[in-house]
Image (cartoon, grey):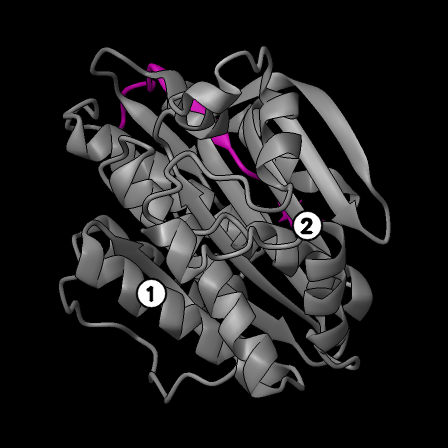
Amino acid sequence: MASAKPDIRIELPGAFVLQQRRLERLIRLLQPLLTLEKPAAVEVDLSRLVSIGPSGLALLIAALRRVDEGDLLAEDSVLLPPRSPQVKNYLMRMNLIRSLVGGEELPEPIERHQTRGFRPCQMFSDDDDYWRVSKALTDALVESCQTDQVARAAVLVCLEEVTENVIHHAQAEHGFGAAQGWRKTQQFEIGIVDLGRGVRASLTANPEYADIADDASAISTALGARVTATPERNSGVGLYITKMLLAANGGSLLVRSGNGAVYSGATNEVRTEAESMPGTLVALRARTDHPLDINAVYQQLENDHPSPPEPDDDQAR
């Protein structure tokens, strides 16, 4: 441990989960890492951490990678581990340390088993990565929730759109994704985070949406049907369908970017938050005791937003 007093000290006590909007507290506490521009001695204290969900973990790792890769950490910077052996082991299994050292296979005091119903945090940086991570996160969902092939395909489309946006439009170095299920509470969560330019900057690059003035409106627009910054690349239905799918399941979707936060599911709310979230956080939470059935969702999508008719041969000529 460094003996000198750090320039920046960040303590993360308690729980950082989706419930009761505790991720907002995490965003607030991580502001020194998210906004750091000059090298500093940083102490991140996890000693009193009680729990952290996959969305919070992905955000924490993204923030730590940002300052590390930007050469913003002085040599006497330190990460203090949790006092709880259970929490410490959980962070190891979810790849906190591996993510920070670039995926190196370090000796660990835990025995790793085949992942089922969860996926450790994975970083993606290119086209091969985002496809692999999207599939892994979808597989974890399928292992935990009752889904048919159509629902599985829909969730995969959603996650591919979210992760592809990180690579091609968010102007982020990396994205991070993790998944975790809880048998006792019958809940399952997927979290995807990047620290790029955010939803509003990405969406307003499309002239059709250039007049969107604030982050909350940009997120609300992005959650609509057939909305995309790049219509030449994807259909823009992934987030919309997944939002409806999770609502029917009893789950929820959170998209947090800039000062905007949009919650959909059991409760629907659009908020402007005090703290800015650089980039985008997308958190999907499903109930594992209810099926994910998407056939009715697709029918409603087509009824409300029908696809444009294809030209006939005469029109084509």
Instruction: Report the residue marked by disc 1.
Output: 133
37 lies left or right of 177: left
Mark 2 falls on what kind of element?
A: loop
Camera-nearest residue between 46 and 94:
94
Which residue is at a point 26% across and 28% down the rendered structure image?
Answer: 67
- The CA distance from mark 1 to mark 2 is 30 Å
x and y percentages locating residue 176 in the rendered image: 36, 51
Q: Which residues are magenta?
A: 3-18
Task: Find residue 20 and report its image quarter.
Answer: top right
Whichever of callouts 1 and 2 sits on the residue coming sooner in the sequence is 1
Q: Is residue 143 visible?
A: yes
Task: Find residue 110 and report its image quarter.
Answer: bottom left
Q: Is residue 250 visible?
A: no
Count of picture labels: 2
Query: Pointers 1 and 2 in contact (CB under 8 A)?
Result: no
Check disc 1 and give the amino acid type.
Val
x and y percentages locating residue 160 in the rendered image: 39, 59
Residue 49 sits above or below residue 27 on the image: below
258 lies left or right of 120: right
x and y percentages locating residue 284 in the rendered image: 61, 57
x and y percentages locating residue 246 in the rendered image: 72, 63
Mark 1 falls on what kind of element?
A: helix
| Disc on res. 305 | 2
Camera-nearest residue between 121 and 171:
171
Residue 173 sits above or below residue 178 on the image: above
